[in-house]
Amino acid sequence: MLLKIFRLAEETGAARAGIRSVAMVLCVASLAACENLSELGSELRRTYDETLLSLDKSLNNNDLLSNGLTAKEQREIVTLDRPAVRRLQVRLAKLGFRPGPADGILGSRTVTAINSYQSRFALTVTASISRGFLNHLETMTEGKLAGPPLSPLRQQSGLPDSPINLASDDFPTYLPGTSFIYSNGETERVLGEKDFVVRWARGDGTTYSTHRNFLLPKSYWTSGSERGTVTTSGTPDELWPFREGSEISFSAKVTMQNGNDPDSTERRVDLWRCRNDGSRMVTVKAGTFETLLLVCSRGENPAAPDLVRTWYYSKAVRHYVRFVETDPGSDTIKSADLVAIRPGALNWPPIVRAALARALIHALEMPNDSSQMPWTSSGVNTHVTIEAKSRFIDNDGRQCRRFEQIWSENGHRRHYPAAACKTTAGKWTIPGLEGGSATSIATSGDVS
């Protein structure tokens, strides 16, 4: 009887929510006719699952048509089978969006969550429904986004129990020699800082300067024969959304020139808006961090920006651990996760740097899942605590381990998280720096 009614609901095109309501009514009305509750529950679950499986394709197509998608885009969604849709729902939920239960069904709540995500990051509908978009979500989360238990009210908003605001002491700060390694193969190194303007050198040979408030565009850069300058309105330290939900805006005057040719000079004025979207727990190769989601969009129309940049900023390391840039015009996404931060051992004797590297390798080899090891040397005035953390297998099948160096010097503490992987030759290296020296796993050495 139950099965016949479900078949009838399918033939008449009943909505999924309606089917669920019918099932609940039948559950109550049929108690007297069932021998026991277990039999009724088993029958109900079986018939309900069978019906949902048969309705997946038709309901999905109806959802697609209601969103005005083309036939090609509809076929692209259909290629996402139920397990793939379930993975998509899990990732959306962990990123703070609400797709409903992870049932593998591309229903209206899931579509709404996708639309919310694409609106946040200025993605188009085509990009947001493809298998490539699912791969993007899995890259964003690496399957490991977690956080503390949430109260019902805060859970509905996708935020933790207490807002995480920034104080002036939480502002980004950088020490000369510190280097940052990212998952996209890029490396950046701090050359120096003066009046809160930081000079950077990238692994590709380009250099640039920017205020410690990295939300602002680069103030000066060189790339090949091209160079450019940017002047922003307002005071840089005030252009930082310290409080959750706060927003700032500023204009940036951009001047670019190719070589010494004055005729190649280009000028424009960009309008930027940045907001603090609250906290997120995010896992990257360097570790798991509580971060603040800082989103900046460029363009005169806030609803249709021409560029969106998103930083996941960690107060613990005074730097971002994930960066995402989306270009709505070309529907491209660029992202980079933090792999390692290496402290700059300025003026350290080579023998001392080598000693720290040996201690670090020893800590990585320790069998405990989590261990700490202090390190000191009479040759430097720095106390280091090495924390060996969780193990994982990377995409190349290598054994890897996360670790952190905590440097204490002159009453100040700095955290340097990183990941290292073991080569087939048994050598520990930081991904992206496989050709480095043995000491490169611990420090970046002198500024050159």
Image: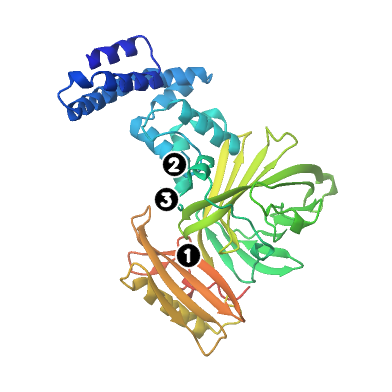
Categorize mark 3 by other alpha carbons within 10 Å: few (<14), some (14-19), many (20+): some
Which residue sits at x=61%, y=34%? 330
Sequence-wise, the earlier of marks 3 and 1 is 3
Q: Is residue 266 visible in this depiction of the protein? A: yes
| As drawn, 161 above or below 20 | below
Question: Which residue is under mark 1?
Answer: 418
The percent coordinates of residue 406 (x first, y second) are: 51, 73
What amino acid is labelled 3 in the image? Answer: Lys
Q: Which residue is most to the left?
A: 35
Q: Is residue 203 visible in this depiction of the protein? A: no
- Determine which quarter of the picture holds residue 79: top left
The percent coordinates of residue 161 (x first, y second) are: 52, 50
Relative to 226, 144 lies left or right: left
Categorize mark 1 by other alpha carbons within 10 Å: few (<14), some (14-19), many (20+): many
Question: Which residue is under mark 3?
Answer: 144
Dot 3 falls on a residue whose secondary structure is loop
Q: Which residue is most to the front?
A: 32
| As drawn, 403 above or below 161 | below
